[in-house]
């Protein structure tokens, strides 16, 4: 059966475009995953690219290599085309004048194109491909990218696939820009709807912000006030959109509640000025808590002064009959009362604190301290958490709790997952502080490890990101602090490992599948975001543990 030439032509074009989609799919998905990881924020993405190296992050290593090989091959074939054309070809028809060099060029270009197609297929089939979480936004951006790739391949042909693959950073950026106006319109609409909805409910709202300690303090307050059935933001929900969408989901459910009063406890995060103000416009807090001001996300804010102003937006939003609680042990926090137009309570371990703790001790079961003549015990590790506990105690009193009630609640508190948690796992005592990382939490972990009894102490960390120009100095100083505490340091990030190594004074290894297991009885301190698999990979295997003895 003979097919019309037009059918064959169109079929070839469609096949070429489909092959182009396959070739571009893996890098497009990887870039979408990376950008979503940075919350589709241009500032966070560019900071990541500056720190990690923009070329490798955007283009990889193998695909640019294939493209360079293609360019080199084209150049060589063009230079030596006369020699190639003069070579005798077996079975060639003298009536057909088809340059041999052109045939060689086409075959070579096809090979390069099928290499990038095969690379994409292998990446996906080997299950090494990273995918974005398929939200509506991710589907729209990736879908637009696929449509653009389809038409680009349709117009350029299969021979340019190695070049088109390298255009994926621009494709994903164009797709993002395409939906940006719609995204901003929908965002404003959602924030406004959440604000209107919140205004219909008579809630006492508590806002919590700071560079570090927000989640722990939020959970402490929620535990102390659990008898009042508070609404509490879930883990990792602390942005404008996250809080707005959560409120729109949970507030309607309170209509069926028989409770006469309700509390709203909200964790508030920010990467630049104005974001906490937007959160406060929605949440309408009457109680504000500032946990700690450090260097976290300093690269995004630009300076600590701007960071302080951004966090101060919470205190500025409080009404005159509201109440602010701040950490007096943190120097930047101690002067933030200037932002508040309401009463301020300072907590800490120094004389300048209104709510002061003393006789602070780390015990095998947690921390112990005294306020006045009364002793408090909290099953949470790290003496730095005393300030978080004091902040929660202050809020508890403001909400009508007595000292005895607060004391009983604190005795039954359980630390949030991955926030300075201590546990036994495969014969190792493990400190899990992988919820997040900051200079303050890193320092606290080193100080805690220093006072532990184990002879072998190992540090496993991802380091601290988004520190800007201070990145090298901060990691070098942390290395100096850790050198007399840990016998070995393992980083998941090679660049940060090199900075840390300068202060550590001995080799720092980078985590890999070849990293050896720890000896039983060691202490493993894990700091910064990492997978559970990364931690368990270096724990002793069950076969290495001593068998239990019997009498």
Image (cartoon, rainbow, N blue to C red):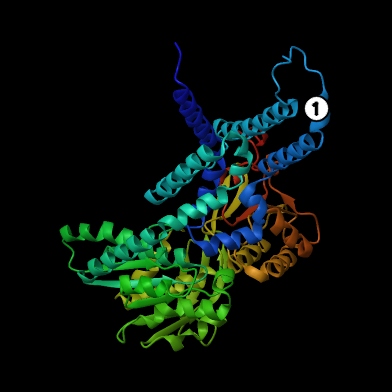
Camera-nearest residue between 405 and 326: 326
Q: Where's residue 269, x and y in %?
A: 45, 67
**Quadrant where the image shows the C terminus:** top right
Residue appearing at x 72%, y 14% in the figure: 93
**505, above or below 72, in the image:** below
Q: Where's residue 216, x and y in %?
A: 46, 64
Residue appearing at x 38%, y 57% in the figure: 234
- In this orientation, does residue 349 appear? no
Mark 1, other Cα within 10 Å: few <14 / some 14–19 / many ≥20: some
Pointer 1 residue? 84
- In this orientation, does residue 280 appear? yes
| Left or right placement of residue 366 versus residue 252 in this view | right
Residue appearing at x 31%, y 83% in the figure: 319
Residue appearing at x 38%, y 65% in the figure: 240
Quadrant in the rendering for residue 105: top right
| Left or right placement of residue 100 versus residue 525 in this view | right
How many numbered marks does the figure carry? 1
**103, above or below 74, in the image:** above
**538, above or below 501, in the image:** above
């Amino acid at each position: 059966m003979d097919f019309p030439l037009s059918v064959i032509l169109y079929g070839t074009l469609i096949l070429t475009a489909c092959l182009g989609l396959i070739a571009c799919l893996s890098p497009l998905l990887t870039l979408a995953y990376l950008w979503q990881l940075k919350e589709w924020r241009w500032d966070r993405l560019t900071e990541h690219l500056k720190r990690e190296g923009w070329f490798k992050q955007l283009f990889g290593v193998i695909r640019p290599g294939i493209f360079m090989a293609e360019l080199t091959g084209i150049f060589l074939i063009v230079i030596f085309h006369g020699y190639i054309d003069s070579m005798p070809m077996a079975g060639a028809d003298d009536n057909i004048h088809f340059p041999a060099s052109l045939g060689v060029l086409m075959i070579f270009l096809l090979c390069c194109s099928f290499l990038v197609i095969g690379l994409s297929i292998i990446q996906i089939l080997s299950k090494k491909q990273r995918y974005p979480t398929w939200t509506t936004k991710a589907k729209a951006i990736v879908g637009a990218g696929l449509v653009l790739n389809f038409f680009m391949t349709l117009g350029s042909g299969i021979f340019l696939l190695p070049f088109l693959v390298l255009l994926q950073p621009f494709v994903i950026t164009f797709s993002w820009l395409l939906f940006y106006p719609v995204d901003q319109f929908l965002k404003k609409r959602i924030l406004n709807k959440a604000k209107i909805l919140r205004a219909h409910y008579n809630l006492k709202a508590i806002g919590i912000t700071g560079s570090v300690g927000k989640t722990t303090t939020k959970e402490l307050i929620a535990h102390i006030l659990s008898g009042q059935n508070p609404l509490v933001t879930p883990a990792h929900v602390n942005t404008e959109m996250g809080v707005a969408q959560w409120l729109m989901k949970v507030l309607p459910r309170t209509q069926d509640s028989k409770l006469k009063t309700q509390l709203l406890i909200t964790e508030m995060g920010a990467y630049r000025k104005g974001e906490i103000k937007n959160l406060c416009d929605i949440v309408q807090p009457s109680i504000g808590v500032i946990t700690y001001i450090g260097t976290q996300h300093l690269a995004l804010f630009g300076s600590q002064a701007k960071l302080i102003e951004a966090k101060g937006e919470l205190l500025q939003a409080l009404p005159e009959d509201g109440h602010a609680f701040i950490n007096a042990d943190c120097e930047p926090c101690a002067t933030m009362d200037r932002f508040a137009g309401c009463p301020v309570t300072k907590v800490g371990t120094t004389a300048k604190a209104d709510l002061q703790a003393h006789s602070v001790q780390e015990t095998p079961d947690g921390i112990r301290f005294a306020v006045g003549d009364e002793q408090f015990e909290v099953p949470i590790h790290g003496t730095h958490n005393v300030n978080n506990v004091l902040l929660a105690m202050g809020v508890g009193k403001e909400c009508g709790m007595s000292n005895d009630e607060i004391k009983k609640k604190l005795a039954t508190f359980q630390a949030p997952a991955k926030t300075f948690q201590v546990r036994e796992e495969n014969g190792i005592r493990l400190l899990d502080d992988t919820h997040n990382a900051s200079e303050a939490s890193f320092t606290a972990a080193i100080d805690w490890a220093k006072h532990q009894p184990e002879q072998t102490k190992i540090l496993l960390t991802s380091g601290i990101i988004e520190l800007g120009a201070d990145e090298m100095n901060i990691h070098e100083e942390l290395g100096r602090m850790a050198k007399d505490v840990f016998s070995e340091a393992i980083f998941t990030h090679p660049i940060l490992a090199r900075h840390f190594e300068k202060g550590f004074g001995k080799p720092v290894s980078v985590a890999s599948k070849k990293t050896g297991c720890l000896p039983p009885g060691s202490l493993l301190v894990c700091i910064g975001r990492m997978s559970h698999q990364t931690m368990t990979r270096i724990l002793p295997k069950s076969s290495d543990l001593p068998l239990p003895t019997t009498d």
